Image (cartoon, grey):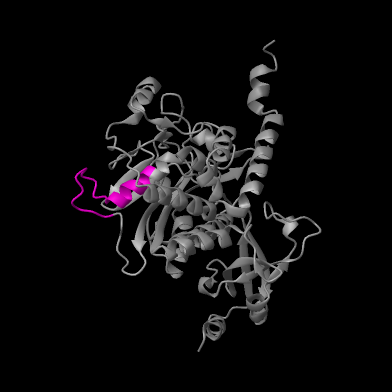
Amino acid sequence: MDQREKIKKRIEEDGIEYILVQFIDINGSPKVKMVPAKNLDDVIDDGAGFAGAAVMGLGQGPHSHDMLAKVDLDTYTLVPWEKGLARFAGDLFVDEEPYMFDPRQHLKNTLNQLKDDGFAFYVGIEPEHFLVEKTSGGEIKVWDPDNLDTLDKPCYDFKGIANVSSYLRQLMNGMDSLGWDPYQSDHEDANGQYEVNFTYSDALTTADRYTFFKMMTSQYAKQHGAIATHMAKPFSDKTGSGGHIHFHLEDVKTGENLFLDRNDKRGLGLSSMGYSFIAGILDHAKALCAINSPTVNCYKRLQIGTGLVSTTSGFTWTPAFVSYGDNNRTQMIRTAGPGHLEDRTVSAASNPYLVFASYVTAGMDGVKRGLDPGDPFKGNLYDLSLEEIRSKGIGILPQNLNEAIENLENDSVVASSLGSIYDEFISLKKAEWADYHKTVSKWEVDRYLTMF
């Protein structure tokens, strides 16, 4: 029995009536077409058609030929919040050709090139997000049904997590039913902020799952009268939401973790390849920032140090320095264990397909060039002044979107990692920056209205 027939049998056994054919825009926002299950052959062979110009950043105009999302049969996923519904991730095609403005197609192409070189990129993600509600005036506040989530340092607080245990249990049960192995959840550093960890996998699978995770949070939160937001920093006085990535390279043939070396003289359990990958990331960090933190709001999270940023907990937990270290959360790249690296700067508001494609490209540039990152920094970066940080040769990540875009434009390696998407990405991000500066904010009105 071929895969198509196996999937048809599963659809029948699972009682599936409708299929969501899911794809994404340039921001990583999930988009879907809903198709009766009896029409599965149509979306395998031809695809679910739509007007590409109606979706942000897919490089089409109203005159363009139809765009079609063909289902990837490997991504068959029951929709746990509604019976009779399943989802497939889709790949975009135009005129029967893979459409490379599609972030998923682009990541697949990047990973296939990596596979040809004998490597596989494995990635996990820490999906931080907030539960909020809108007030009658249209502003947002923390969703706090029992009025208990009020501590200045609410991280791991029992009463805070008990407040939303029904939501978290539903979410984790749904993830478990899909075979994702969710193994921990917690109340994060900000009021109304949560995280659910699940076992990590190859980069494409993790990107697909993170996209579906965002869909799941929106639907389970709605059942409780809340809004799940993956905005990087919805509250000025609270810690922002990251999408920290954990990663390593494997040998395609053996499955060996190529970053692992228990005899590492630096004591971090990393191989020379792991160090060269780190060096590539650090070398391209300022350009990567535009992709890892792609919105104006992301830079409200990615600010220097703790002294300059006011949060109720006292920390931002977001390193803004181009650095790496041991098991040290003040670093951009943390060694979370032998052969195991974490980048803590990636924003929850990023597109995982673009992040993973650009990240592995930058890291492999370091490998190909045999770069070395130097010795790890093991101190507390938050305790150092900017002058001390600069004196140690540690760089600072861009502090706004415009600065990040300028770095991306001047980095040929990271620019090339976006392929066909590059021009569209740059254009949209410059427009976003311009729109931001045209808008008069409440802060400006409150500060200046009666000042003069």
| Residue displayed at 34% across by 49% down | 341
| Residue 223, percent from left and from top | 57, 58
**Furthest residue in direction right, as rendered:** 63
* Prevailing secondary structure class for the magenta stretch in the rendered image: loop
Give the quarter of the figure containing the C terminus.
top right
Q: Viewed as shown, does residue 252 lie left or right of 451? A: left
What segment carries the magenta color?
A: 260-279
- Where is residue 394? Give x, y as percent: 37, 30
Residue at the bottom extreme? 1
Depicted 47 relative to depicted 231: above or below: below
Residue 16 percent coordinates (x, y): 59, 78
Q: Quadrant of residue 88?
A: bottom right
- Residue 303 part of the magenta-drawn span: no
**Residue 127, image x, y percentages:** 46, 51
Q: Residue at x 36, y 37 (%)?
A: 331
**In the image, residue 333 above or below residue 313:** below
Please indicate, yes or no, whether residue 350 appears anywhere in the rendered image.
yes
Give the residue drawn at x 70%, y 35%.
Answer: 435
Q: Nearer the viewer, residue 333 or 228?
A: 333
